Image: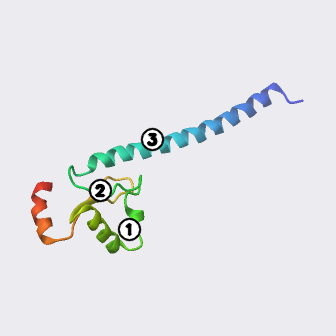
Amino acid sequence: MESPAFDFQQRLTEHLIQSLVIGGLVAIALCVVGNEVIRSRARVPGLKGPAGWPVVGNLLDIRLNAALKFQEYAKKYGDVYQVSWTTLKTERIVLGFTYTSTRFNWGTLA
């Protein structure tokens, strides 16, 4: 038969591990949600573009052939659009595909 002290220590250890795992998962979830709020606020108002994935932005979409993906984005979102280029930062890249559209829109973005 186990002693009450050993039983208490075993239950405390089990609860500690569960608490650490749950706390870690909650912390990761809060970081992802916080990053998404910051990323959404970093978007240039009125400028279209793909939303991107949490934390990594559009990096997964362009990893194989960026030029081809950017052309697809230009067909879908127009000559000037924005993409998210982020890990845990809130960087926005504005891409322009024609000189005229970029020159025309640059003054409205600054």
36 and 27: which one is in front?
36
Colour treatment of the image: rainbow
- Residue on which disc 1 sits: 62
Count of numbered marks: 3
Per the image, label 1 sits on a secondary structure element best described as helix
Residue 82 image point, x, y percent: 26, 59
Q: Pointer 3 and pointer 1: residues touching (CB < 8 Å)?
A: no
The quadrant in which residue 6 appears is top right
Mark 3 falls on what kind of element? helix
Mark 2: which secondary structure? loop
**Residue ID at (45%, 41%):** 30
The answer to whether residue 106 of the structure is visible from this angle is: yes
Percent position of residue 107, x then y: 9, 58
Circle 2 sits on which residue?
91
Q: Which residue is mark 3?
A: 30
Q: Amino acid at mark 1?
A: Ile
- Which quarter of the figure is the C terminus placed in? bottom left
Which-is-in-front pick, marks 3 and 1? 1
Say whether residue 43 is left or right of residue 51.
left
Crowding near the residue tagged with mark 3, few <14, some 14–19, many ≥20 C-alpha atoms within 10 Å = few
Circle nearer the N terminus (3, 1): 3
